[in-house]
């Protein structure tokens, strides 16, 4: 998402500074920006002290392992970047008198007891379960951000991002969409966890970037859900992807459901509509086609 946000802000005329320790990210996603005068890149771990020279108007804190495969492999880095990383960047925002937006997640709702989830729902998270490292890091991030807002009057924004997809995802990052697409393109079995009745709601990255851009420009400091409210079961989703790749010989197989896997996931976006005038525009078939074209190219090269 960082590369897409960099593109958007760069195209709006901002001088963009990217900072990433490349734990899960790839420089190839920003290769097209590297020679630009108004784009800079720092290879840095934001869980360590962050120094940037000059003035800053905005800080967008998106650093974190984000897919379950990543944060289950790197639980301590995940907790550190959500806590120490957030603290460092809030400090930087204070020093620079900058507005800061932090990337929270629908995972703060855990395995929700209400569907759809609106921002007033406090969530159902198992703090010591394997996914707790991500969910609790993001919950801490929100708490720390609100504390800086309340104590230091810092201009803060909190976006609760629901599943987002699009070009530049890694084929092997373990999330359902790249897994299904790469399996279908290589004629391997499509592995659905559980019976596939668990639901997700998938938002195309361009819609997400628009929502984030609007939230950053708004005056609203409480958390805002950004996501696509169209809910689909994972089994239906696997079938939808197979339909897009009619030449595939893949068959659907079932695997055990991972611990604490949320059964339902759907954003209530009333707040985003009212406060930001935002709704997603890209429908799933169109978004999936664009993502599939990207993955086909990746597999070819
Ligand atoms: N993609 C989604 O569906 C989704 C959903 C909810 C929340 N989010 C949040 O959005 C943000 C971006 O996610 P993404 O999907 O683009 O994932 P991503 O893995 O593509 O990007 C995360 C980036 O953070 C970098 N990073 C990790 N730890 C770091 C550290 N300590 N210092 C500097 N950089 C570090 C990684 O190298 C990577 O480039 C994350 O904070 C994630 O939690 C994403």
Image (cartoon, grey):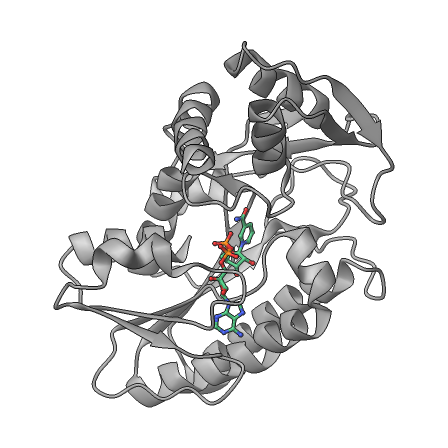
Residue 170 picture location, percent across and down: 51, 46
Residue 216 picture location, percent across and down: 34, 59
Q: Quadrant of residue 89?
A: bottom left
User: Is 212 or 241 nearer to us in this picture?
Assistant: 241
| Residue extending furthest toward the front | 301
User: Is 257 or 169 nearer to us in this picture?
Assistant: 169
Residue 266 visible in the snapshot: no
Q: Is residue 177 left or right of residue 131?
A: left
Residue 40 picture location, percent across and down: 24, 72
Q: Is residue 229 left or right of residue 68?
A: left
Q: Is residue 97 left or right of residue 88?
A: left
Name the image quarter holding the C terminus.
top left
Residue 243 picture location, percent across and down: 56, 12
Position of residue 238 relative to residue 139, above or below, is above
Which residue occupies 50% across, 85% down? Answer: 151
| Total numbered badges shown on the rendered structure | 0
Which residue occupies 40% across, 33% down? Answer: 280
Which residue occupies 58% across, 68% down? Answer: 142
Position of residue 87 relative to residue 258, above or below, is below
Q: Quadrant of residue 93?
A: bottom left
User: Is 120 or 30 nearer to us in this picture?
Assistant: 30
User: Is 13 or 266 nearer to us in this picture?
Assistant: 13
Q: Is residue 177 left or right of residue 287?
A: right
Which residue occupies 34% across, 90% down? Answer: 95
Position of residue 67 relative to residue 273, above or below, is below
């Amino acid at each position: 998402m960082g590369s897409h946000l960099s593109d958007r802000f760069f195209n709006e005329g901002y001088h963009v500074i990217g900072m990433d320790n490349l734990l899960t990210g790839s420089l190839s996603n920003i290769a097209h920006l590297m020679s630009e005068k108004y784009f800079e890149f720092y290879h840095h771990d934001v869980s360590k002290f962050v120094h940037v020279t000059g003035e800053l108007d905005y800080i967008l804190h998106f650093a974190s392992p984000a897919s379950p495969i990543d944060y289950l492999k790197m639980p301590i880095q995940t907790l550190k970047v959500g806590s120490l990383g957030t603290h460092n960047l809030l400090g930087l925002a204070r020093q620079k008198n900058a507005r800061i937006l932090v990337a929270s997640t629908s995972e703060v709702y855990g395995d929700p007891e209400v569907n759809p989830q609106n921002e007033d729902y406090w969530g159902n998270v198992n703090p010591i379960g394997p996914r707790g490292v991500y969910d609790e890091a993001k919950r801490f991030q929100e708490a720390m951000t609100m504390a800086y807002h309340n104590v230091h009057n810092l201009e803060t924004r909190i976006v609760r991002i629901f599943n987002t997809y699009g070009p530049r995802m890694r084929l092997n990052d373990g999330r359902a969409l790249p897994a299904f697409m790469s399996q279908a393109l290589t004629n391997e079995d499509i592995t659905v966890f559980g019976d596939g009745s668990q639901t997700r709601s998938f938002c195309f990255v361009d819609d997400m970037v628009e929502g984030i851009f609007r939230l950053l420009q708004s005056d609203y400091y409480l958390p805002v859900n950004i996501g696509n409210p169209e809910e689909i079961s994972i089994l239906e989703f696997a079938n939808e992807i197979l339909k897009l790749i009619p030449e595939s010989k893949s068959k659907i197989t079932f695997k055990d459901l991972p611990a604490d896997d949320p059964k339902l996931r759907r954003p209530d976006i009333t707040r985003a509509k009212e406060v930001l005038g935002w709704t997603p525009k890209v429908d799933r078939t169109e978004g999936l086609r664009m993502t599939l074209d990207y993955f086909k190219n990746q597999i070819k090269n």
